Image (tube, rainbow, N blue to C red):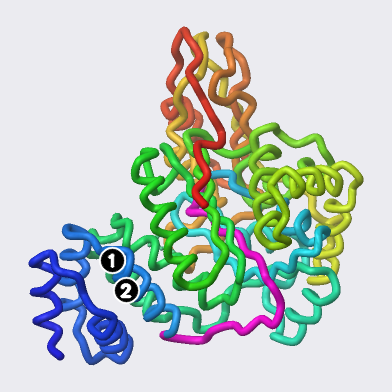
Amino acid sequence: MRMYDIIEKKKNKLSLTKEEIAFFVKGYVSNEIPDYQISSLLMAIVLNGMDDIEVTNLTLAMANSGDKLKLDFNAVDKHSTGGVGDKTTLIITPIVACLDCKVAKMSGKGLGYTGGTIDKLESIPNFKVQLSDEEFINQINDINVSIISQTKNIAPADKKIYALRDVTATVESIPLIASSIMSKKIASGAKNLVLDIKVGSGAFMKNINDATKLGQTMVNIGKNASINTVAILTNMNEPLGNSIGNNLEVLEAIKVLKGNGPKDITDISIELASYMVSITNKITYEEAKTKVMEVLNNGQALNRFYELIKYQGGDISKLIHNSKYEYKVYAKECGYITKMDTAKIGKISSMLGAGRIKKDDLIDYNAGIVLNKKINDYINKNDLLATLYTNKELNLSNEYLSSLEISDKPIENKLILGVIK
Ligand code: URA
């Protein structure tokens, strides 16, 4: 088999066989096939696509390229395609853990304008994100949930291919995004998976058609790999909740678990948790939702979150938000907020210190943004729109203001845009 012929085949819009896909994935990981040939193939895939069988074969070849976690229980996982202010993992994993669902979660650090669950958890004093395999499994057996940083060699083929995509303008491709995410999920051992596909100004997928295609592709891969998969399409035209930034988001997650969090993040958490419980315990969505509401309302989910923190060494009583500077952003005009450039708001939060531009950047757990007004809120001149928290002398108020659009009429703003089963 020759790499040249595989590139030529995809250039001519033909489907690649399982053997051809396995050949280039294996050859790339073992450094036998050079970057330039893989780049050329990736570009051909971006331009000419892949059918469902090819995408599944690519996903499985990448999933099999490194360590695979073997879990001897019916684990459930959730994956978000990335957003701003998205702290749902902190809320829903303790909820579902109260309802006989086991969550063995390996999460990542944030990069670019989206935050990472691991950074949020590390903002809790003494929280350990690295556990031995034995500690990880023991904790799940005890309290049904553990969240750790991914240290295993999960899907190294994806890691290498993703780094190449990043510098060859080949990230934006539905087959490549779907196979990249699903390869890691398959190698992580979950048997049930809820995907939160974000759509809008703060997401990879800017429109509902692309998001639907991505969701459908990932659900098909899940089915072909015997993983119960559901994809929920959700709005990312504004940040989720009112807080962005690491310890601010932990504090907001606690508010949601206490029943007094912002409505959007509460509703989306209930939706995702209900699907997780429904597909794992094989009950209807409505039955699952009733149970989810019960453990939220009776404080069990909040207690489970505190147990999770304690189990991993964290001390929530020591989590106090403070920063040297607070820049208040006031409205200069009146009207309804009808647009928020969510990616830009995420970048502002990153620049304040909450995120990384490069992989090894240090982050400031206290930096971030608290939003007072969001889409469809009516604002008067001089109303407080947001507070920017930072330890840098860096006033980004004007940048924040320029990320908003004000109009005289509210817009349609749905939170849940679709479900793909
Ligand atoms: N996240 C991933 O893990 N892979 C992609 O290709 C895009 C987003």
Q: Amino acid at mark 1?
A: Arg
Residue 231 in picture, x, y percent from top left: 52, 52
The one of 185 and 34 positioned closer to us in this rendering: 185
Q: Which quadrant of the figure shows ligand 1? A: bottom left
Residue 374 in the figure: left or right of residue 5: right
Q: Quadrant of residue 209?
A: top left
Of all residues shown, which one is farthest toward the right? 298
**Mark 2 residue element:** helix
Residue 371 in picture, x, y percent from top left: 62, 31
Q: Which quadrant is home to the N terminus? A: bottom left
The one of 376 and 127 positioned closer to us in this rendering: 376
The residue sitting at 59% across, 82% down in the picture is 69
Dot label at residue 161 = 2
In the image, which residues are magenta?
Answer: 65-83
The residue sitting at 59% across, 47% down in the picture is 86
Residue 240 in picture, x, y percent from top left: 59, 39
Residue 104 in the figure: left or right of residue 290: left
Instruction: Decide if ligand 1 comes within 8 Å of the CB at mark 1.
Output: yes
Tag 1–tag 2 contact (CB < 8 Å): yes
Q: Amino acid at mark 2?
A: Ile
Residue 355 visible here: yes
Q: Judge whether residue 132 is colored magenta.
A: no
